[in-house]
């Protein structure tokens, strides 16, 4: 059985399944987050959707580079959870299937490539409080 976090499932909504990959990147007592400015400002684990035909680990590397400008090494899958939500940037209701990884931040190559994202190092205990997704917070807290 897959864990579920967030809003209750609404029977009146038709959800589109959206698989995604997200990563916890620790360095000492800090973890690397991305701050997304819109559609609403929030801190997130770096990651995002898996494109059609893309392998999950390849998507993870791509998303981390786009959102933080960092390369990563040795990703290890920690688990998966689902959440049901409205995604205003895509104008759709989604069943997000969130695959969570732990990896090593290797090297900062550039500023984030994706507009509206900022890479932020934050103490783990603070990140546990500010990450927008309840499921992501639970995985961070479990480390």
Image: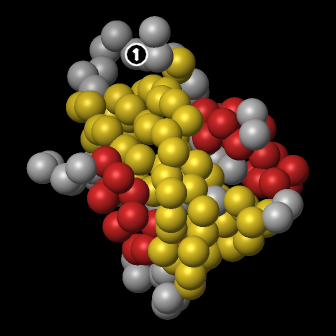
Q: Quadrant of residue 37?
A: bottom right
Which residue is tagged 1? 10
- Number of residue marks: 1
Visible residue check, residue 44: no
Vertical placement of residue 122 versus 4, above or below: below
Q: Residue furthest left?
A: 53
Quadrant of the image containing the C terminus: top right
Q: Residue furthest bottom?
A: 110
Q: Quadrant of residue 59?
A: bottom left
Task: Give the x, y percent position of residue 133.
Answer: 60, 41
> Could you tell me which residue is drawn at 81 percent across and 47 percent down?
129
> Could you tell me which residue is drawn at 78 percent across and 46 percent down?
128
Q: Residue furthest front?
A: 74
Q: Nearer the viewer, residue 109 or 133?
A: 109
> Could you tell me which residue is drawn at 58 percent across and 49 percent down?
102
Vertical placement of residue 85 versus 13, above or below: below
Visible residue check, residue 127: yes
* Neighbour tally class for label 1: few under 14, some 14-19, many 20 plus, Cα within 10 Å: few
Which element carries disc 1, helix, strand or loop? Answer: loop
> Could you tell me which residue is drawn at 52 percent across and 20 percent down?
4
Task: Give the x, y percent position of residue 24.
Answer: 62, 52
Vertical placement of residue 6 versus 110, above or below: above
Task: Give the x, y percent position of residue 46.
Answer: 52, 60
Q: Quadrant of residue 95?
A: top left
Task: Give the x, y percent position of residue 10.
Answer: 40, 16
- Scheme of image coloration: secondary structure
Q: Is residue 42 left or right of residue 76?
A: right
Vertical placement of residue 126 versus 41, above or below: above
């Amino acid at each position: 059985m897959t864990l579920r976090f967030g809003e209750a499932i609404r029977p009146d909504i038709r959800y589109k399944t959206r698989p995604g990959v997200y990563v916890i990147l620790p360095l000492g007592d800090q973890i690397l987050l991305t701050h997304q400015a819109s559609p609403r400002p929030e801190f997130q684990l770096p990651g995002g959707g898996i494109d059609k035909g893309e392998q999950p680990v390849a998507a993870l590397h791509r998303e981390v580079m786009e959102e933080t400008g960092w390369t990563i090494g040795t990703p290890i899958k920690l688990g998966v959870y689902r959440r049901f939500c409205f995604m205003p940037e895509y104008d759709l209701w989604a069943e997000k299937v969130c695959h969570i990884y732990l990896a090593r931040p290797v090297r900062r190559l550039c500023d984030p490539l994706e507009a509206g994202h900022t890479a932020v190092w934050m103490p783990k205990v603070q990140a546990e409080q500010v990450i927008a997704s309840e499921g992501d917070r639970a995985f961070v807290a479990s480390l």
